[in-house]
Amino acid sequence: MYMTCIDCAKRWDLYKVRIRCTCGGLLQIEQNWKELDADLLKRLFQARLMERMTPYASGVWRYKELIHPELPAEAIVTRYEGNTGLYEVDAAAKFAGIRRVLLKAQSENPSGSFKDNGMTAAVSHGRALGMQRFACSSTGNTSSSLAMYAAWCGEESYVFVPEEGVADGKVLQTLAYGGKLVRFPGTYDDGLRFLEEHADEFGLYVCNSVNPLRIEGQKSIVFEIAHQLQWSMPDWIVLPGGALSNASALGKGLQELRSIGLIENVPRVAIVQAEGASPFHRMVEAKEPTLTPEPHPSTRASALNIGSPPSWRKALQTLEYTNGVTVAVSDEQIFAAKELIDRSGIGCEPASAATVAGLKRLVAEQVIDKDETAVCILTGHLLKDADALTAYAGKRPEPMEHRMWERMMDMASNKRLAALRRE
């Protein structure tokens, strides 16, 4: 295993602490897949579903041969992440206007978001390198995931979180895990820029998605989808686009699954952004060669509130490989989809609901055919942004809870009067 730059192709040692190439390009992990046997791997992964209380009980490390085969098992830092549900939801299919929709609830991860899939790989590798202080810039989910893993293995975490635009629940979760919180003026992008420039000075191991091990861990999401569907993929996979790490990981994972022979058909990928924070969508739509950052991103879906997504080049490779598309949706469309997902009994934070909102729009625009199938990835838990739930209460013309109480009291009183009359 080694790292290569996606821009200049320079090779780097995997066991040296490095986030970017000297040319400024992002790094990615390379492995040799030629000696892997697809049928043997399928049997191995299936057998590991029986594992309990070992690293292979993790929905990430179950696929260790495809994630980090050289990492010693005793070095793995795991909370048995992954293992998240894949649910067929008829109401979502009807809402989007498509034949079949499955929701991949990454919200069921230990810290409540998909970030755990990548963080277990980043922290495990960092500790194998001898690092003891881990850091990230975050709109919330990354910080709580990092703080959880650092606490679990007895190390320190430093989380850089913007002063505004981040859900209180995510900040409180980070603090509860013992993360050292650094609040700063500006956006996620400013915090990441600071870490890339100064992490070495402070002895910090950066665990944002610019770290290629994060991408390796997050590949497991699509590995698990393929495994759950018995290695037969849907027509589409739809996911939200914030920092674009998930899109990057998804594309890399699909390429590897196909290269090894674990899947035959490669689904198309749709990346959904919020209209107020959609620099990647605008770039793709305008067929521009480079991304122009959004200096003042603005969306109520806080996990999407990123104006300069660092992984845009890798995400573009995913679109090229899968013949994928992008779409932007309004906050109103996001919250309409969120209400449907919440009412289905699964629930999600607003950024997750962008997937179903985007699917609905793509079907309406006839980009996706109504007879096709789609998996929508729900990235964060319902309670990650509890304030968002008040939007539903605000829609009610009067407090239904009080009316329900009054009706029930009237019924109870009437029954007691009827009983007295019978006596």
Image (tube, rainbow, N blue to C red):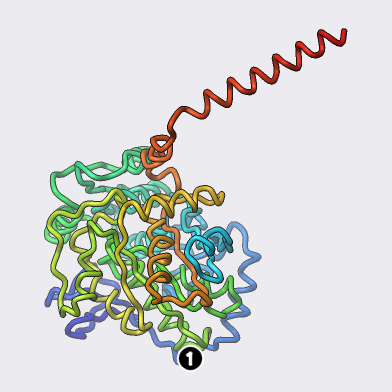
Give the vertical position of 221 relative to 143 (above or below): below
**Residue located 53% across and 78% down the image:** 233
Q: Is residue 124 visible?
A: no
**Residue located 61% across and 77% down the image:** 230
Q: Is residue 296 left or right of residue 128?
A: left
- Other-residue count near label 1 (Cα within 10 Å), few / some / many at <14 / 14–19 / ≥20: few
Q: Is residue 38 visible?
A: yes
Q: Position of residue 323 (x, y in %)?
A: 36, 83
Q: Secondary structure at mark 1?
A: loop
Q: Is residue 322 left or right of residue 204?
A: right
**Residue located 34% across and 65% down the image:** 272
Q: In the picture, which quadrant includes the C terminus?
A: top right
Q: Is residue 88 left or right of residue 329?
A: right
Q: Which residue is mark 1?
A: 35
Q: Position of residue 21 (x, y in %)?
A: 17, 75
Q: Position of residue 400 (x, y in %)?
A: 51, 29
Q: Is residue 158 left or right of residue 362?
A: left
